[in-house]
């Protein structure tokens, strides 16, 4: 492809009042309106003074800006271009939205959490976001935190966490249903220097309550099917007991303590079952690709040093892979050596055997994709110097994430598991020209748009009118 020589572009003028850069915002915001986003915010968010007036419209504007690609307050100016004022009522200036966020306190953030939970429940009811509630598949909740980098000490609560990078700590809980992409069911912004398990017990309790609220009429209830996965940072009595107390199972990586090593050494050699990875796995310590591993399990009681009622029985599932690291002395070994990775689980072995439990636990890495997705969109920055404003920004980013996922789920299977960036490129940031006739607006979109079918499905579902034939 190259520029045309017969019709070269020699001028550019920003003067068209009938153009939209993000026509996909129209069906997406219609979906948000159908689920009562503005009404929920008006009902639950009570920010004082005139800066908190019309909370519903301001929350909707912030979510809309994030859906369209805004990752800072200044980027909210994209809501005020071309024909946006014609299609949408009262697009707010970035300064107004910034003042709204800076008026938040911790209590207002919790109010916004309530809005996010109810909004997600509405999306699940009206879209195939989580699939059929009676599919019989296991619901998996993943818990993990990530550091959102900031620059300079001016941000309230910023500090150096486990990554050694100055930032704020975002604790995220996702729910993954059989055959579906994950949705975010819990979020909390914390000080950058706080430990990973801080507040995790409360988070997992809220997340499990949210998951059960998504499909309250599921036959038999979802209680027996919920599994909470986490890495070794969350292996502690407060978090594990909160999961079990809520009636869910746990699958959490354990650290290689003396007790764990002793349990692994007690596994008989005949108990190891060879497994083949679906794809080769790159082993960073050795710098090689491997595709062979073995798994075994043994009965294990977690937190054995605590009081008897607090000891948690379960099983220790261990995966071992050949130790391919080169020895510095240049000498080989007389027999094959192994590297071990273990996790503790309370699942029923009759339901999840050793191999299946190991395979399911390894999929915990899916939450890292959610972290990357958020950081590639609205969570690329934490725009305010005030901690409460940044906490509210995180909740709004989560609502934008779930709304984008819900919109994609209405278009069919091709975009059901796509990243936010892909959904935005194919469905949201589609240019259009508006034309008025008989008090109605018609959108004229690019001819031969590759994702025209998916866009029309979304528009038909939310626009209440069929798209015109081209």
Image (cartoon, grey):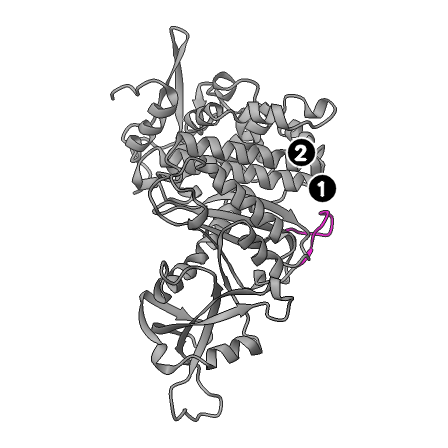
Q: Looking at the image, which residue is at 51% across and 50% down? A: 247
In x, y percent, where is residue 79?
Answer: 53, 27
Left or right, 365 with respect to 380, comes to left
Q: Are marks 2 and 1 in contact (CB under 8 Å)?
A: yes
Question: Which circle marks residue 54 in the picture?
Answer: none
From the viewer's perspective, is residue 308 above or below residue 99?
below
> How far apart are labels 2 and 1 at the CA level?
9 Å
Question: Which circle marks residue 386 in the picture?
Answer: 1
Left or right, 3 with respect to 122, comes to left
From the viewer's perspective, is residue 221 above or below residue 289?
above
Q: Tell me which segment is drawn in magenta.
A: 149-160
Counting residues from the start of the chain, the first of labels 2 and 1 encountered is 2
Q: Looking at the image, which residue is at 45% across and 57% down? A: 364
Q: Is residue 92 visible?
A: no
Label 1 element class:
loop
Q: Which residue is mark 2?
A: 101
């Amino acid at each position: 492809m190259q520029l045309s020589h017969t019709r070269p572009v020699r001028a550019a003028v920003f003067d068209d009042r009938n153009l939209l850069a993000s026509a996909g915002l129209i069906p997406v915001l219609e979906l948000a309106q159908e689920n009562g986003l503005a009404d929920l915010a008006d009902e639950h968010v009570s920010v004082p003074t005139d800066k908190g007036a019309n909370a519903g419209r301001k929350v909707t504007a912030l979510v809309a800006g994030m859906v369209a690609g805004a990752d800072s307050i200044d980027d909210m100016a994209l809501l005020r271009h071309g024909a946006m004022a014609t299609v949408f009522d009262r697009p707010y200036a970035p300064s107004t939205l910034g003042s709204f966020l800076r008026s938040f306190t911790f209590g207002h953030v919790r109010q916004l959490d309530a809005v996010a939970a109810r909004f997600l429940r509405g999306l699940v009811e009206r879209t195939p976001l989580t699939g059929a509630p009676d599919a019989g598949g296991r619901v998996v909740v993943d818990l993990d935190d990530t550091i959102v980098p900031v620059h300079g000490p001016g941000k309230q609560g910023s500090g150096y966490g486990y990554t050694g990078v100055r930032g704020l700590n975002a604790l995220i809980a996702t729910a993954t249903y059989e055959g579906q992409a994950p949705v975010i069911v819990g979020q909390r912004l914390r000080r950058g220097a706080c430990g990973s398990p801080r507040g995790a017990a409360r988070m997992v309790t809220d997340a499990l309550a949210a998951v059960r609220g998504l499909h309250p009429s599921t036959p038999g209830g979802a209680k027996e099917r919920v599994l909470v996965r986490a890495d070794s940072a969350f292996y502690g009595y407060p978090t594990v007991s909160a999961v079990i107390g809520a009636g869910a199972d746990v699958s959490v990586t354990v650290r290689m303590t003396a007790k764990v090593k002793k349990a692994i050494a007690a596994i008989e050699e005949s108990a190891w079952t060879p497994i083949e990875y679906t794809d080769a796995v790159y082993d960073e310590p050795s710098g090689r690709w491997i595709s062979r591993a073995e798994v075994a399990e043994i009965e294990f009681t977690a937190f054995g040093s605590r009081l008897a009622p607090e000891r948690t029985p379960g099983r220790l599932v261990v995966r071992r892979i050949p130790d391919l690291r080169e020895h510095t002395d240049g000498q080989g070994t007389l027999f094959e050596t192994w590297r071990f990775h273990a996790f503790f689980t309370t699942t029923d072995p009759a339901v999840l055997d050793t191999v299946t439990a190991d395979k399911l636990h390894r999929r915990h890495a899916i939450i890292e994709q959610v972290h990357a997705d958020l950081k590639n969109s609205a969570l690329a920055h934490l725009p305010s110097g005030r901690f409460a404003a940044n906490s509210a920004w995180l909740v709004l980013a989560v609502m934008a994430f779930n709304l984008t996922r819900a919109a994609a789920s209405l278009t069919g299977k091709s975009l059901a598991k796509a990243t936010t960036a892909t959904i935005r490129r194919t469905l949201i940031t589609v240019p259009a020209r508006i034309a008025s006739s008989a008090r109605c607006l018609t959108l004229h979109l690019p001819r031969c748009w590759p994702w025209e079918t998916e866009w029309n499905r979304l528009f038909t579902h939310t626009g209440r009118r069929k798209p015109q034939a081209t």
